[in-house]
Amino acid sequence: MLKYSLLPMERAFAFQILSQSVQIKDAINYIGGSFYASNGWQIKIDSCPEIRVASREIYLRGSSKENDLRVDRTWNFSLNLEKDEAISQINSALSEIISFASSYNQ
């Protein structure tokens, strides 16, 4: 349904959608275009995958193209601990949208 890579680096991480089913996009669009995870992160659909840590927003791919392998890099964490916490929260939020979309029926 949604496979992604969230690769930690020194005070940074890289995010890439490896595959995304259309069911993810349909489920988010069905609830008004934004999914709010229980940890405060907001998941939306856009043309390119991107993570905005400061505003706690995750943008997933707007299409299901398997060849769209854009990599979003997030830098400038002052501490690796901040980066690790962000990665944990992002993984949790993405797990919630996968669970929600799995139970979504059109």
Image (spheres, rainbow, N blue to C red):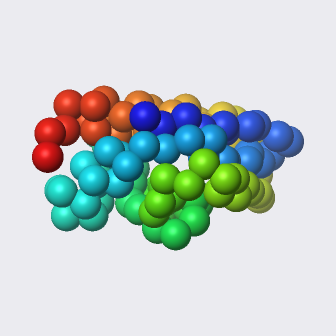
**Residue at the location (35% across, 54% down)?**
25
- Quadrant of the drawing holding the N terminus: top left
- Residue farthest to the left, as pictured: 106
**Residue at the location (66% across, 37% down)?**
5
From the top left corner, tell me how far across and down residue 2 is, in percent. Answer: 48, 37
**Residue at the location (28% across, 38% down)?**
101
Whether residue 82 is visible to the viewer of this picture, yes or no, is: no
From the top left corner, tell me how far across and down residue 99 is, in percent. Answer: 30, 30
Q: Is residue 70 left or right of residue 44?
A: right
Q: Is residue 48 above or below residue 31?
A: below
From the top left corner, tell me how far across and down residue 73 is, in percent. Answer: 74, 56
Looking at the image, which is closer to me, 91 or 103?
A: 103
Whether residue 57 is visible to the viewer of this picture, yes or no, is: yes
**Residue at the location (17% across, 56% down)?**
31
Q: Is residue 43 left or right of residue 27?
A: right
- Residue farthest to the bottom, as pictured: 47
Q: Is residue 6 above or below residue 62?
A: above
Looking at the image, which is closer to me, 11 or 33?
A: 33
Res 30 quadrant in image: bottom left
